[in-house]
Amino acid sequence: MNMKKFKSTLLIMLCVVGLSACAKDDVSNTEQNQVEVEQSQNEESENAQINTNVNESDGIDLSNLKYVDYETNRDEKLEEAIHKTMPEYDKETYGPVKYYYNKVDLNGDKKEEIFTVLYGSYVSGSGGGTGLLFDNNYNLVSKFSLVRTPIIISDNKTNGWNDILMYVSGGGIESFYAQMKFDGKTYPSNPSVQSEVKPGTKIEGKAIIANEITPNSGIELN
């Protein structure tokens, strides 16, 4: 082989090797991009389920509300009470559950009830979390489904207890604020089938569990 042919052959080999390396880099970059996209989608999906805080007013005047952040201290008695409401729950089987809570006097007896909202695959979904209301002795008063935070505690009362307003959305229905009125023993469990707060209504009261809920917030249930 003369020198001219040798140089041509060598050049062709170098080009082939270079193209092969570029192809491998493209595959590697494509795989990395795919992983990043999947991670991003997973994070968005998780946040969509967990972060259910709403700021929409739907024509309701919320300007006079006082917003109260959820408590950050673990409450062992509250955790015991929560476990009693779901005796079949097992963390290893169903995954972790986080809870958020505030204490508020709903019936004017100077004793604070405890309102808590639970999030986790066992207790929540795209429609919201599970809500539990306990009296000051940690006895269950009411259980709620499809709960989105914040929870509005209206100054208006029914049968001696403050009305609770909950935001309802998803599932193809038009969003609205539902009125949850105490019937003398308990509150309704499903806000989606309760009467709507009429647009233009000015709400007086407070909004509890009002700060943002994220995957890293809340107290994990022992």
Image (cartoon, rainbow, N blue to C red):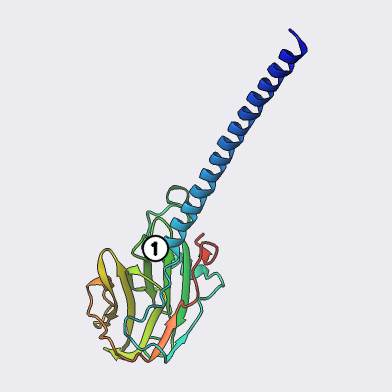
Q: Quadrant of residue 122?
A: bottom left
Q: Position of residue 162 (x, y in %)?
A: 33, 87
Q: Position of residue 14 (x, y in %)?
A: 69, 24
Q: Is residue 207 left or right of residue 182?
A: right
Q: Secondary structure at mark 1?
A: helix
Q: Nearer the viewer, residue 127 or 61?
A: 61
**How many other residues sit within 10 Å of disc 1, few (<14), some (14-19) or many (≥20)?**
few
Q: Nearer the viewer, residue 197 or 136?
A: 197
Q: Position of residue 155 (x, y in %)?
A: 36, 91
Q: Quadrant of residue 133?
A: bottom left
Looking at this view, name the residue that lies furthest to the right: 3
- Residue plotted at (40% across, 90% down): 205
Q: On screen, 212 above or below 2? A: below
Question: Which kind of residue does numbered mark 1 sit on?
Answer: Lys
- Residue plotted at (42% across, 86% down): 206
- Residue plotted at (33% across, 82% down): 164
Q: Nearer the viewer, residue 128 or 15?
A: 15
- Which quarter shows the N terminus? top right
- Residue plotted at (55% across, 69% down): 74
Q: Quadrant of residue 201?
A: bottom left
Q: Is residue 198 left or right of residue 11?
A: left
Tell me if residue 160 can be seen.
no
Residue receiving disc 1: 84
